[in-house]
Image: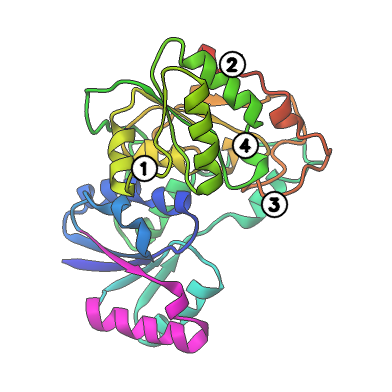
């Protein structure tokens, strides 16, 4: 049995995208085991994948070089890996790489395509092209180790008994989020025909969604009511998820649920479309030459009017259902 130590400590969606890659890689290479090191609260993402051992850590316990050195030694002592996969490639993981190489371990890291992404998000670049999908970039790390990995890019429904629409109207950054009045109107239209479940988190989002639930018949807010494992289970039972370019799209992918995704200052060209999701289910303002201006949606609007979201017609979403 070959044991690979893998790490990614970043945002929820990025870590969620590793899970379907692990599943297919390990099915094709049953003699391999992956130890996934990430933030503690991400454990449920990997719960049902055979041959994955999840190691949740609190990064605040391992600050600075000496903290990371201690982490590296603890992981070697506990897991004794054969190979190391850096699926993040930031300063913290570069330090871990160095420590492991000094100990004689072979370390391979993700190529995030930084320069290509900078070109893609240059508002003066009018020649925008599709970049490699992030899930393929993860798979490339294992290919470089000498393993064969062929990703199916297909959804795998967890259950066939599906009903209702999930709607996650929030995102971490303004550049990814439909204006709330548009989302409210969309929820009102959808709830006339189907039960709509709202997804969110945090105090403000929960308050907003509970108000929507009171005002729009046939809707139900799940925000703040479920554990993460229960939330994943609910997503698996939905007929359809509607999400911004956010973690909820990747959770839908993980649970084999079709997702209609809304994109503003970001674009599927950067490679972050959910695993197995169809490009036909992408909703965006097509004819803005400034898009995408951001990989993660965290930049201010260079035009100042957020046209990529303000001009998006919610009827486009309704038609795709």
On the rendered structure, is 139 left or right of 320? Answer: left
The alpha-carbon separation of the residues under discs 1 and 4 comes to 23 Å
Element on which disc 1 rests: loop
Disc nearer the start of the sequence (4/2): 4
Tell me the residue that label 4 is attached to: 177
Task: Give the SS element for disc 4.
Answer: loop
What's the colour scheme?
A: rainbow
Q: Are marks 1 and 2 in contact (CB under 8 Å)?
A: no
Labels 4 and 3: the sequence-earlier one = 3
Front residue of 147/276: it is 276
Residue 254 seen in render? yes
Discs 2, 3 touching: Cβ within 8 Å: no
Q: Which residue is tagged 3?
A: 118
Q: Is residue 73 magenta?
A: yes
Residue to which mark 2 is pinned? 316
Q: CA distance from mark 2 to mark 3?
A: 29 Å
Give how far apart the Cα atoms at labels 4 and 2 are.
Answer: 16 Å
């Amino acid at each position: 049995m070959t044991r690979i130590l893998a790490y990614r400590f970043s945002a929820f969606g990025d870590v969620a995208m590793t899970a379907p890659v692990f599943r297919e890689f390990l099915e094709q290479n049953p003699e391999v085991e992956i130890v996934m090191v990430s933030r503690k609260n991400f454990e449920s993402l990997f719960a049902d994948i055979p041959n994955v051992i999840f190691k949740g850590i609190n990064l605040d316990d391992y600050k600075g070089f000496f903290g990371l050195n201690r982490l590296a030694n603890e992981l070697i002592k506990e897991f004794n890996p054969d190979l190391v996969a850096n699926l993040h490639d930031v300063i913290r993981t570069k330090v871990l790489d160095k420590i492991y190489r000094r100990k004689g371990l072979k370390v391979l890291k993700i190529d995030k395509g930084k320069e290509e992404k900078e070109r893609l998000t240059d508002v003066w670049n009018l020649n925008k092209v599709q970049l490699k999908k992030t899930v393929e970039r993860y798979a490339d790390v294992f290919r470089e180790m000498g393993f064969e990995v062929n990703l199916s890019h297909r959804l795998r429904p967890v259950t066939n008994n599906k009903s209702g629409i999930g709607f996650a109207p929030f995102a971490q950054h303004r550049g990814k989020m439909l204006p709330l009045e548009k989302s409210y109107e969309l929820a009102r239209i959808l709830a006339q025909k189907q039960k709509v479940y709202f997804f969110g988190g945090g105090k403000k989002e929960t308050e907003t969604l509970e108000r929507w639930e009171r005002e729009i018949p046939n809707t139900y807010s799940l925000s703040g009511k479920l554990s993460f494992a229960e939330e994943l289970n609910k997503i698996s039972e939905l007929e359809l998820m509607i999400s911004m370019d956010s973690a909820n799209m990747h959770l839908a992918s993980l649970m084999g649920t079709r997702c209609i995704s809304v994109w503003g200052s970001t674009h599927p060209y950067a490679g972050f479309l959910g695993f197995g999701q169809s490009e036909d289910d992408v909703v965006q303002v097509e004819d803005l030459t400034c898009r995408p201006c951001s990989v993660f949606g965290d930049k201010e609007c260079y035009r100042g009017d957020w046209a990529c979201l303000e001009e998006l017609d919610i009827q486009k979403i309704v038609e795709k259902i």
